[in-house]
């Protein structure tokens, strides 16, 4: 009896790590254990590493996200043509409105008014976490890029709010604007000269952009967001978070291949430096973010319904049941909720409550699997 050999696709170790994102939960778990056993040494470590991780290292994480969005605007991408992006953007607006409303209502009910300034952490949708959950439930399905675009849109609203409402340091907006104009002009000049090395974009316009945001009072982790779109790219995109072809050597692809593994290290350090919170003695305000996240599916479905009534369309093979599961997966806040919490709240008990609330939203992954099973969608459809 002969057997036909099964061809197994071997992926690079870095792609495997990036796809399943084990570094982040490992960092968070280690931070929780460290901060609750040897708290003094943990907080010395967190204080010493916070600036480098949150203000410099995370810039490369946001750069990879920007890379995905930039390529998605190419022919064949999830954002091409632009009308395909309208529905998840509308759903993200509904998500933000409902999340903030519930967050503020919960704090009013609990009497925790000092936490209201942290409302932006309640709008956060974790991009790595939702991607992993969506892939495990749906596999290769249009619901996955829909969810990613929704998460990117919601987080973009949060990032804009952080930049406008919570400027960092002693803001010098005129100097910042002048430097940013120089950074963007430099990136444009490199692109016009067809410079292909991403290092020249990073070390030139990228550094200038970082200083522009830092001096202008905007979180410098966003420094590469206006620079990455100038990187030379291929003619077509295979989809959000999809492995590029081996023969692809455009600047965007080379940038991703070089930085995907270091960014895993950044996410490990981010979890380690920011997720350490004591699991005792905190107030009830920590539940504001998780409860607000539970209302997010209702905002997403309602906003999508309004947008569809106005003439927009769901992607092919995405129905209302899939949309509900997408909304449940979007309840995970984790990385971006932690990032926003650190960006808007000073060190102290209030920040610890926001951080622990962000960590609790990991439970949204279990909610997504339960609802998918009940509604029989994705891997549970058969």
Image (spheres, grey):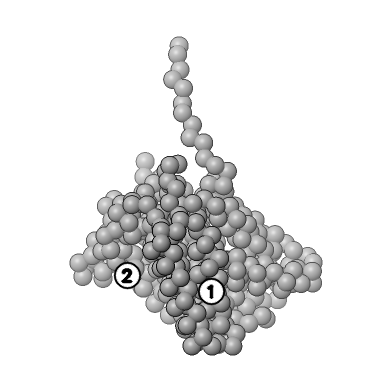
Judging depth in this view, the residue of 306 and 228 nearest the camera is: 228
The residue labelled by disc 1 is 208
The residue labelled by disc 2 is 90
One can see residue 336 in this view:
no
Residue depicted at 32% across the width and 56% down the height: 74
Q: Is residue 136 above or below residue 193?
A: above
Residue depicted at 45% across the width and 13% down the height: 2
Left-right relation of 71 to 204:
left
2 vs 1, front mark: 1
Residue depicted at 74% across the width and 69% down the height: 45
Residue 182 image offset from top left, x and y in percent: 47, 76
Residue depicted at 51% across the width and 83% down the height: 176
Left-right relation of 226 to 258:
left
Residue 130 image offset from top left, x and y in percent: 47, 58
Left-right relation of 133 to 115:
left
Helix, strand, or loop for circle 1?
A: helix
Judging depth in this view, the residue of 43 and 240 nearest the camera is: 240
Judging depth in this view, the residue of 245 and 184 nearest the camera is: 184
Label 1 environment density (alpha carbons within 10 Å; few <14, some 14–19, many ≥20): many
Q: In this view, does 173 lie above or below 54?
A: below
- Mark 2 or mark 1: which comes first in sequence? 2
Dividing the image into 4 quarters, which one contains the C terminus? top left
Dividing the image into 4 quarters, which one contains the N terminus? top left
């Amino acid at each position: 009896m002969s057997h036909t050999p099964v061809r197994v696709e071997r992926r690079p170790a870095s792609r495997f790590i990036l796809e399943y994102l084990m570094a982040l939960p490992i960092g968070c778990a280690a931070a929780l254990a460290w901060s609750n056993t040897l708290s003094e040494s943990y907080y010395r470590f967190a204080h010493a590493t916070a600036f480098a991780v949150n203000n410099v290292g995370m810039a490369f994480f946001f750069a990879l996200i920007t890379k995905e969005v930039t390529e998605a605007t190419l022919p064949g991408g999830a954002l091409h043509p632009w009308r395909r992006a309208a529905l998840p953007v509308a759903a993200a607006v509904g998500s933000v409105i409902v999340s903030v409303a519930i967050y503020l209502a919960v704090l009013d009910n609990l009497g925790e008014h000092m936490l209201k300034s942290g409302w932006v952490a309640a709008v956060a949708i974790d991009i790595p976490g939702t991607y992993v959950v969506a892939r495990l439930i749906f596999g290769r399905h249009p619901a996955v890029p829909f969810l990613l675009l929704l998460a990117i849109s919601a987080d973009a609203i949060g990032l804009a709010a952080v930049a406008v409402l919570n400027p960092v340091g002693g803001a010098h907006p005129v100097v910042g604007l002048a430097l940013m104009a120089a950074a963007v002009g430099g990136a444009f000049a490199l692109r016009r000269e067809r410079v292909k090395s991403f290092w020249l974009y990073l070390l030139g316009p990228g550094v200038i952009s970082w200083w522009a945001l830092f001096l202008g009072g905007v979180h410098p982790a966003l420094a590469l967001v206006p620079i990455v779109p100038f990187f030379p790219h291929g003619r077509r995109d295979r989809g959000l978070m999809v492995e590029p072809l081996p023969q692809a050597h455009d600047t965007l692809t080379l940038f991703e291949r070089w930085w995907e593994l270091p960014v895993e290290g950044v996410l490990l350090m981010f979890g380690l430096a920011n997720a350490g919170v004591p699991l005792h003695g905190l107030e009830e305000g920590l539940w504001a973010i998780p409860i607000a996240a539970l209302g997010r599916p209702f905002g997403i479905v309602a906003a999508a319904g309004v947008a569809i009534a106005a003439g927009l369309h769901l992607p092919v093979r995405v129905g209302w049941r899939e949309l509900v599961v997408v909304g449940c997966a979007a309840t995970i806040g984790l990385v971006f909720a932690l990032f926003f919490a650190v960006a808007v709240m000073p060190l102290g008990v209030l920040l610890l409550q926001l951080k622990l609330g962000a960590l609790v939203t990991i439970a949204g992954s279990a909610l997504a699997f339960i609802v998918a099973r009940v509604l029989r969608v994705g891997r549970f459809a058969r």
